[in-house]
Image (cartoon, rainbow, N blue to C red):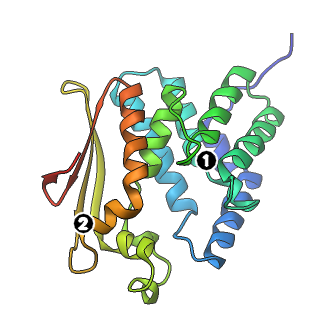
Amino acid sequence: MPKYNHVTFEDILKNEEIKAYIETGNENLGQIGFTEHGFPHAKRSANYAGNILESLGYDERTCELARIAGYMHDIGNVVNRADHAQSGALMAFDILNRLGMPPKEVALISAAIGNHDEGTAAAVSPIAAALILSDKGDVRRTRVRDKETVSEDIHDRVNYAVERASTVIDPERKTATLNIKIDTRICPVMEYFEIFMTRMVLCRQAARFLGLQFELIINDTRLL
């Protein structure tokens, strides 16, 4: 039988190939006007995904696989923003196989990455569901690259208006709550819905897969 390796989240963080893809993909998106998709987003997505499953009592290895998926989920941006989830899934499949990860774990991570982008996304596993919630919940002012574009670009404006955001899992109430504080002098709440409604519907589906009800609270008002 083949001998497989126990690939850890720390191994992934130290991997220079993965670092290069995240860094270059983020640079590529910067050239075409997208918000930050670099190491801050990768690490936040990783931590949130793992924490979500931890809070729901999933085993340590499943939580670690969620962190790996969260960290690697946007590497496909190095190829093109279009279909980056599928590109990233295939890249992750190749990288993780070369690292000697067991096929079942490679499959779980690749499927989560391939199913994280709205339009083609689906919560096909707990890891995929946690990745969706962590990725879509990362809205923050520091993702905006150029303050000068805030008045012109709705994506920059919505992110720049966010003063704080957090996703809280309550196992007892069985809720996943995205709580956001928005400066409405920069962006009205309606603009948030204009570009993020599809993402919020996806978050609701992901939460439901985990046995939770999704709640969206903006400026202390529950909207979903």
Residue 185 visible within the image? yes
Residue 189, numbered circle? 2
Position of residue 151 measured from the top left corner of the image (x, y, whole percent): 38, 86
Between discs 2 and 1, the one toward the N terminus = 1
The one nearer the camera, 171 or 149, is 149
Number of labels in the image equals 2
Q: Residue at x 51, y 70 (%)?
A: 35
Residue with the mark numbered 1:
73
Residue 19 visible within the image? no
The C terminus lies in which quarter of the figure?
Answer: top left
Image position of 187 with respect to 14: above or below: below
Report which quarter residue 52 is drawn in: top left
The N terminus lies in which quarter of the figure?
Answer: top right
Report which quarter residue 155 is drawn in: bottom left
Question: How far apart are labels 2 and 1 at the CA level?
Answer: 28 Å
Residue 134, numbered circle? none
The one nearer the camera, 149 or 60, is 149
Q: Is residue 53 left or right of residue 78?
A: left
Q: Residue at x 22, y 63 (%)?
A: 181
